Image (spheres, rainbow, N blue to C red):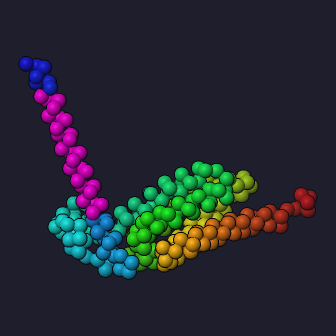
Amino acid sequence: MLILLFFFRRASRLNTALKLNQRYQQKLRTRQALVQAALDLMGEDKSLGELSLREVAGEAGIVPAAFYRHFQNMEELGLALVDDLGGKLRTILREARKKGAYKTALQASMGLFFEYVRNNRLLFRFICRERTGGNKRIRQAIRNEMAFIAGELASDMRLPSSIPFSEIQFLSEMIVTNAFHMAAEFLDSDLKDTANAKRLQWKTVKQLRLIFKGGLQRKKKRIRTTKSPLQS
C-alpha cells in the first residue's frame, strides 16, 4: 500500500511539473508572437510609437487583455526587442573574436554581424529607427547595449599595456557605432545583390581597420611628444 502511495505521489508531482512546463512554453510562444507581431506591423517604415497595443495583440492572435500577462505596455515590449538583439549579438560576436588574430577576428565578426542583420532585418530596422526615435528609455537601452558590446570588444583587444583601457574603450565605441551605422546602409541596399552586400561588408571592415590604426597612431604620437630629453 505504501509503495502504491509513493508511486501515486511521484506521478502526481511529475504530472504537475509537466503542466507547469507546458504553460511556461506556451507563455514563451505567446510572448514571442507579440514581439514578432510588433516587428511585422512596424515593417520597414513605422515606428513603435505608431502602433497600438490592440493592433499588436490582434496580430498575435490574442485578446488585448492577455497582452498585460507579458508586457506592462508597448514601451516594455520595445525594451524586450532591444534586449533580445543585444544578447544574441554579443554572443555571436564573442564567438567570432575567439578565432584569434585581430584581422581574422574582425573579418569574422563583421561577416557574422551582417549575416545577423540580414536574417533579422525587421529587428535591425527597429533599432536603426529607435536610436533617434521618440522614446527616451528605448534610446538609452540601445546606447547601453552598444556600450556593452564595445566593452566586451575592448576587453578582448590584444594591445600594448602602455595604452590605457579608457583609450581602448573609446576606440571600441567608435568601432561599434560605425558598424551600426553601416548596418543601416546595408539594410537600404538590395540584399539580393550579393556583390554589393560583400562590397558594403568589406567597406565596413576597411573603415574599422582605419579607425583602429588611427587610434594606435594617435597613441604612439602622444608617447613620442611627451618624452623628456633624458628619455630620447
- In the figure, 97 relative to 60: above or below? above
- Where on the picture, by quarter, is residue 174? bottom right
Residue 16 lies, in percent from the top left, at 17, 40
Tell whether 42 sits left or right of 26: right
Please tell me which residue is depicted at 27% across the width and 65% down the height of the picture.
Answer: 34
Say which of 79 and 46 sits in front: 46
- In the figure, 3 relative to 144: above or below? above
Please tell me which residue is depicted at 35% across the width and 68% down the height of the picture.
Answer: 78
Residue 196 lies, in percent from the top left, at 56, 74
Please tell me which residue is depicted at 43% across the width and 77% down the height of the picture.
Answer: 129
Name the image quarter holding the C terminus: bottom right
Say which of 59 and 2 sits in front: 59
- In the figure, 15 relative to 134: above or below? above
Is residue 179 visible in the rendered image? The answer is yes
- Where on the picture, by quarter, is residue 210? bottom right
Residue 190 lies, in percent from the top left, at 49, 77
Which range is magenta? 8-33
Say which of 7 and 114 sits in front: 114
Residue 214 lies, in percent from the top left, at 72, 68
The stretch drawn in magenta includes residue 222: no
Tell whether 40 sits left or right of 10: right
- The secondary structure that most of the magenta stretch takes on is helix
Tell whether 77 sits left or right of 230: left
